[in-house]
Each structure stands twice: as structure tokens, then as C-alpha cells.
Image (spheres, grey):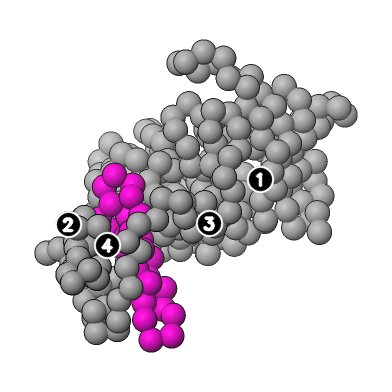
Amino acid sequence: MENNIITIDIEKMMFTANGKLNLVVNTHINIGELVALFGQSGAGKTTLLRILSGLIKPDKGIVKFGETVWFDSSKGINISPKERNISFMFQDYALFPNMTVEENILFAQPKKSREDALELLAVFGLSEFSKRKPSGLSGGQKQRVALARALARKPQLLLLDEPLSALDADMRVALQNEIYQAHKLLGATTIMVSHDLNEVFRLASHVLCIEKGLIGRVGTPDEVFSDSSVSGKVQITGQIARIEKQDTINIVTVISGSNQIIKVIAFDNDMENLQVGDSVLVFTKAFNPIISKLM
């Protein structure tokens, strides 16, 4: 069973804007899952990603990927980031400014293959930008390049630190789809830091909530955030995060701008023009919640 899980049991003293905080994480992640790390700024989410990547050494504990030990303080084991076969996509994308898009992709490949690089560029709609440098790209294009470069390494673990935080709402929705497709394409475990509930519901199969350095709620998005679920609130706008078919009805999960979760029952004829990512208005009529697309 151990060869199918990532084991994390570590402690690390952090120095935050609010003073010292001891990060204590003892959890397991199934290999192949897309996991969201959710919590307030300064809770330890990015530090945990850096520990998994090997960029930060824990004070004590153990990190195992399957049966391979990456870190064990009791045995003096701490293998390098290069040996862990991970890709880390930072908030600012960290593209090399002196390299073209194609060169950025080639740099990340363990075995250089221009054919594979061009294939990745095609997958992310970047073929026409292959000879441009990052300064000539939009924010969304840079995000695509960074994601393609992360995949070029063919990692077993993909770490994403709020990859869409700098983008507007429409671009976020489009690129959330690309992150999901990249996860499926790669077949690797993906761990993503996010403050956006809509993003979590759309992408993650598993959520770890970090609160003041400690793992709190753990489970599926529905399990973790069920205490925040509401129905039938008047005049709430948000985005559709999920549509689930159940017999003759659909359960539509909407995330409002204030990260409020609304679940609405809708029949097939109500769903004709609705899809994941749409901006909608949820309102009540005769005590029943109604969902309507915003134009």
C-alpha cells in the first residue's frame, strides 16, 4: 500500500509576519491525485511545497514518495530537488527572460527533444509564440509557458503555488481547464496552493486545509466545506464550479465572490445554456432557488 501514497510527517519552525509558527504536518496523499492546499496567508502552504520539493529542509520528520525516502531526519537522508523528479511552478512563473519560449521548454527537459517541445507548445496553443521571449507575452501566455515547461520535465510530482492568482476571472477559468488537462496528461500527482474556492471545487479531488501551521480539515471539497454550504439565498452572483448529474436532476455548485458555496437543484431544461465557469445569479422564487446565467 505504501507504494501508492506520499507520506508527510514533518515539523518546521517558520518565521512569519505574525512571528514564529511551527509547521506540523502529518498526512498522506494518494499518488495520482490533484490535491489543493487551502488556508490563510502565512499558514504554511508554500513552505510545505518547498519542503516537498527539497528547497527547504524540515527540522525533523520524514517525507516518502511511495517507497522512496526523500527526507528522514533520523537517518540523515535529504535527497536533492533534482533527484526527486519534481516540477515547481512559482507564482511569478520564473521564466528565463533571456530565452525564447521554445528554449525555456527545452531547458527543462532531462533529455532534449525539440519534437517533444514543439508538441507541448501545440497542446497549449503556443506554437506561434515559440520564438518570443517572455517580455513579449501576456500574463496568460506566460502561465501557459510555465505550465508547459513544468510538464517538459515529466515529473512524478507537480507543485503549483497559486499559479493563477495574477490573472483576471475569465482567464482564470480558461487556464483552470488547462491545469486539469495537464494533470490528466501527465498522470502525476499535482499539489496546488489556492485561496479560490471555485478553483478548488473545479480542480481538486482532495483538499488539505492548513490553519496556523497545522492540518485541519481533510477530504473532498464537499466534505471539507460542507459546513459552508447554503441554499436559496436571494440575489447571489458567482461562478459555476461543478455540475453533477443525479438521475433526473443536476446538482449545480456555485461559488460566490465571497467564497460562499451555493448548491442548486436544476432540471435538464434549466441547464441548456449553463456550463462550468459560467457567471450566474442565484435567486429565490416561491421559496425555490433558481439559477440564471449572467450575460
Tag 4: residue type? Gly
Q: Which residue is mark 4?
A: 232
Location of residue 147 in the rendering, given as x and y in whole percent from the top left corner: 44, 49
Closer-to-camera residue (226/179)? 226
Assign a secondary structure to mark 2: loop
* Spatial CA span between label 3 and label 4: 20 Å
Residue 53 in sight in this render: no
Assign a secondary structure to mark 4: loop
| The quarter of the displayed image where residue 55 is located | top right
* Spatial CA span between label 2 and label 3: 26 Å
| Region of the chain picked out in magenta, as a range | 237-262
| The quarter of the displayed image where residue 108 is located | top right
Q: Quadrant of the N terminus?
A: bottom right
State left or right for residue 14 relative to residue 274.
Answer: right
**Eye-nearest disc, 2 or 1:** 2
The crowd level at tag 4 (other Cα within 10 Å; few <14, some 14-19, many 20+) is: some
Residue at the image point whose x is 58% and y is 40% from the top: 216
Closer-to-camera residue (94/51)? 51
State left or right for residue 76 relative to residue 123.
Answer: right
In terms of sequence position, does the residue under pointer 3 or pointer 4 come before the other?
Answer: 3
Q: Which residue is mark 3?
A: 223
Q: Quadrant of the C terminus?
A: bottom left
Assign a secondary structure to mark 3: helix
Q: Which residue is mark 1?
A: 85
* Spatial CA span between label 2 and label 1: 48 Å
